Amino acid sequence: MTFRPVVSTSQARPTMEGAGVHLHRVFGFGDPSHTDPFLMMDDFRNDDPALYKAGFPWHPHRGIETITYVLDGEVAHGDSLGNHGVLGAGSVQWMTAGSGIMHQEMPRGSASGKMHGFQLWANLPSSLKMTAPRYQDIQASDIPEIIDDDGTRVKVVTGHFWGKRGPVDGIAADPLYLDVSLPPNLRKTLPVDTRANTFAYVFAGAGRFADAADPIGVRVEKELRGHELNIRDLSGNRTLVRFGNGDEVTVQAGPEGVRFLLVAGRPIQEPVAWHGPIVMNTQQEIRQAMKDLQNGTFIRAQDHGH
């Protein structure tokens, strides 16, 4: 077994999308080869409805799949094919845009006004970019959660992990998408596909991701900074951790534990032509998509299932 070394860490950056939704971009619109087959990821969380209620009004998608995972609050969604629904806390929607869809997503906070979720974009290979659109709406109760003897908790959204299979299937990238929680100070090793690009996104607590050559211990320093504990050498809130090659990821949780998304997918390794929510292989295909939007032929005449 070979441990995956950390090749980079970065902080999610504040940005605005949709009609004025304040969120943090984890990665995206850079070099797509670094995260292939994943194109972009956003962390949208806020306690102030004024900063997210305008939502993401009607917009097109083509050539990709979007994965929305809601932790707190709700997201009402609808599309030009007549599909609609509400994603509640703990639920997931995997949308295959394929040949084209017009889509809207409107966040609605919890009773206390809190909203928190993630959206990940996965690329489609050229052979499937013009496939028929489809949805998979997964309720929280349908996502298996594994609780290990040491207190580690893993929700399996998609892929196989520790004998469980996530409820989302038929995804082109065939990814692993896990929501992992470790109790304080625990060191844990998690298996991953050695041929997959892999990243972790820490969104609660803090932890240290290391290979076998790094020290097991965690150095903690207390500094008075607004009554907060500053933990050095740990990847904390809103931190993206990208890994090199190997078939295991090792994490050492900090004093408050750590919760992170662990995502892995085999790279498609095809050219990427990108125009906002439309991702194709060539600029000619992008121009055709723009033409389709202008002349009303973006939505293809075919059977679409929810």
Image (cartoon, grey):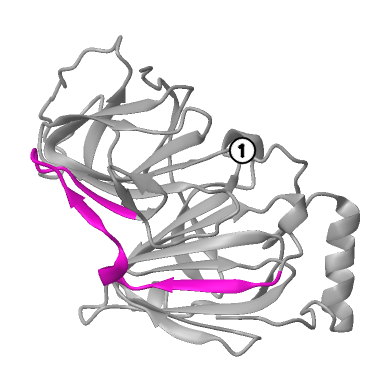
Q: Which residue is mark 1?
A: 267
> Does residue 58 appear in the picture of this structure?
no
Asked if 218 appears above or below 214 in the picture, the reply is below
- Residue located farthest toward the bottom when viewing the structure as drawn: 82
Q: Is residue 144 magenta?
A: yes
Magenta region: which residues? 132-156
Query: x%, y% of residue 255?
Result: 10, 35
Numbered label tally: 1
Q: Quadrant of the C terminus?
A: bottom right
Q: Is residue 74 magenta?
A: no
Which one is in front, 173 or 8? 173
Give the residue displayed 52% in from the left and 34% down from the top: 197
Give the residue displayed 76% in from the left and 79% down from the top: 299
Give the residue displayed 65% in from the left and 86% down from the top: 80
Q: Quadrant of the N terminus?
A: top left
Which one is in front, 108 or 92? 92
Asked if 190 appears above or below 25 in the picture, the reply is above
Which one is in front, 287 or 92? 92
The amino acid type found where label 1 is placed reads Pro
Quadrant housing residue 277: bottom right
